[in-house]
Amino acid sequence: MGCGKSSVATALGAKMGRTVLDTDQLIVARGDRSIPEIFAAEGEVFFRRLETELLTDLQSVDASIIATGGGIVQNQENWPLLRQLGRLYFLDAPWSELKKKIAMGKDRPLAGDGVNWQPVRTLWERRLPLYRQADVTITTAGMTIDAVVEKIFRDKE
């Protein structure tokens, strides 16, 4: 949720010469509708089911960098699928940085109108223990995308 997953994945993929797959982008491409359109028409439960189906389909993919949507961790069924895909990184950014990035973004159906931040912060706080189940946590406060990429690159060696 606004921590830079897609940007870091893109830069890391370029550095490592690997394909980058973004689960949100793949779901949009499969359904030919935006995430807010999917949420509006079918609801969050349906969207979360699409995420699980996609993770299952990605099990045959090798040597790729996969960026996931922030809510993919909510379904415990996804954790074994995620772990089978490789090493899991949690990019841990402070709320103050996340709030700025979320405010600049779009296509975030659970972020609301950007005026009432309490529900968004509550969602983030609820997901934190789930994110912390990742194999590696990288505290990104004040770090550039390149610095985060370098830290992940060094970790994988």
Image (cartoon, helix red, strand yellow):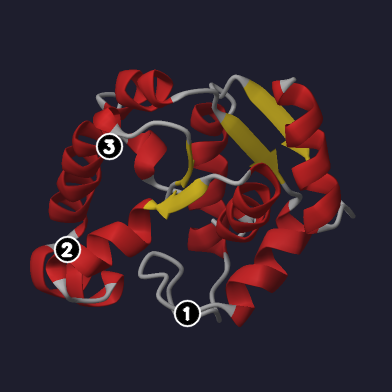
Mark 2 secondary-structure assignment: helix
Residue at x 60% of width, y 19% of height: 135
Quadrant where the N terminus sits is bottom right
Q: Earlier in the sequence, mark 2 or mark 1?
A: 2
Q: Earlier in the sequence, mark 3 or mark 1?
A: 3
Where does label 1 land, which residue?
106
Query: Of the residues under marks 2 and 3, which one precedes in the sequence?
Result: 2
Q: Is residue 139 above or below residue 136?
A: below
Label 2 and label 1: CA atoms lie apart by: 20 Å
On the rendered structure, is 6 left or right of 84?
right
Q: Amino acid at mark 1?
A: Lys
In percent of width and height, residue 61 lies at 32, 34
Image coordinates of residue 84 in percent, x first then y, are: 37, 19
Question: In this rendering, would 92 be left or right of 69?
Answer: right
Tell me the quarter of the image containing the C terminus. top right
Where, by quadrant of the figure, is residue 14 drawn?
bottom right
Q: Nearer the viewer, residue 145 or 1?
A: 145
Residue at 82% across, 41% down? 150
| Element type at mark 3 | helix
Q: Which residue is mark 2?
A: 30
Q: Residue at x 17, y 63 (%)?
A: 30
Of badges 2 and 1, nearer the viewer stands 2
Tell me if residue 115 can be seen.
yes
Q: Find residue 78 and report its image quarter.
A: top left
Residue closest to the eye, 139 or 17? 17
Residue 58 marker: 3
Q: Residue 58 at what x, y percent from top left? A: 27, 37
Contact, CB < 8 Å: mark 2 with mark 1? Answer: no
